[in-house]
Amino acid sequence: MTPALQGLLTIAIGVSGCVGYFYLSNQFIDKVLFPPRGPNAGRNINRANIIRPWLFLFPAMAVLGLYLAYPVVETLRLSLTERVPGGTYRWVGLDNYVQMAAEPKFWEAMRNNMLWLIVVPAMSTAFGLLVAQLTDRIRWGNFAKSLIFMPMAISFVGASVIWKLVYDSRPAEQDQIGILNALYIFFGGTDPQTWLTVPFWNSLFLMVVLIWIQTGFAMVILSAALRGIPEETIEAAILDGANPFQIFFKIKVPQIKTTILVVWTTITITVLKVFDIVFAMTNGQWETQVLANYMYDKLFRANDWGVGSASAMVIMLLVAPILVWNVRNARKEME
């Protein structure tokens, strides 16, 4: 069966299954469970209307429970156990966390993740805000926005391959196909540099890839927020003699502060889970390890399910407060 036919068959079965589920479940409530007849007809109708919304929520809740809640509980269990010969598990408590905390690679990953958290959200949001402001002032702004947003359509692995070519290094006697080394030689450099093997700087070179991707996301959200600013406030500032910088920083930015924070936190969550870029470009070598790649190494290379699960729980604990904060802000905005 071809992939196209499989996709069409999946859509047909999925849609017909959803329609059948909602139709049959409603019939069961109305005809069998709470039939609207007899002396209790009114009460049955009210009961049916109370239960009916849960029919729509149940599939989503079941899928979330199966693919989100259950893996979290199972990962927590694995982080507190150790695999023994025979495929069974032995309870070890917090030993996996103690072992993980004693490994230099874990602290290297934590340090790099903190560096990513400082640099990437700040730079992506700043560049996105700058581009959103500047492109609204030129005639071909929409075309420029399309070009800047285009990297969002590329997978992280695809973007990593592109930037790996940018950082490529060839022997000095050969032509450099890497743009960075070509520019380095052009401006007087002697020997081509293997940029991805230089500690500290290589992490920054990896961050450039994610900044390149996320700037388009930040630009789209912030551009919509800037366009939603009332023109009256800007016109009043101009009449008061404010210059463009004052209008931008003192009028526009304060009015879209909430949107900036949402963009910032969304990119922060992406950064905490970053894996593909590091895996494809350095595989955590040369002091570029991050938590997600560390987890992958433990789970699928070292076959250490206990420490690997413990590192996964650390990632979840780092992401959870940001998610809670986002939900609270969203609720405040709705009130």
Image (spheres, grey):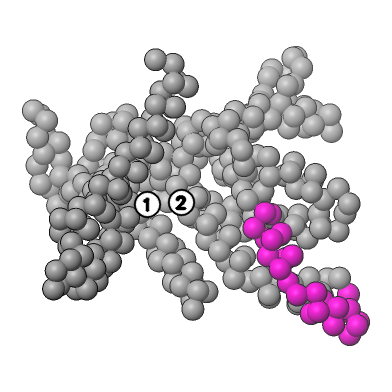
Residue 230, image x, y percentages: 75, 75
51, 191: nearer the viewer? 51
Determine the residue positioned at 75% across, 48% down.
Answer: 145
**Disc 1 marks which residue?**
315
Rendering quarter of residue 44: bottom left
Amino acid type at image mark 1? Ile
**225 w.r.t. 276: above or below:** below
Calculate the distance from the C-alpha at mark 1 to the C-alpha at mark 2.
7 Å
Which labelled disc corresponds to residue 272? 2
Are there few (<14), some (14-19), or many (20+) residues within 10 Å of tag 2? many
Q: Check contact, mark 1 vs mark 2: CB within 8 A.
A: yes
Q: In front: 326, or 245?
A: 326
Q: Write the residue at 23% across / 38% down.
A: 305
| Image coords of residue 276 (percent x, y) | 49, 36
Residue 325 placed where, x, y %? Answer: 44, 68
Extreme residue toward the front, this view: 38
Which quadrant is the N terminus positioned in? top left
Res. 4 in view: yes
49 lies above or below 173 = below
Question: In the depicted view, which residue is nearer to us: 108 or 148?
Answer: 148
* Secondary structure type for disc 2: helix
Q: In the rendered view, would you say 174 is above or below 48?
A: above
Q: What stretch is highlighted in magenta?
A: 219-243
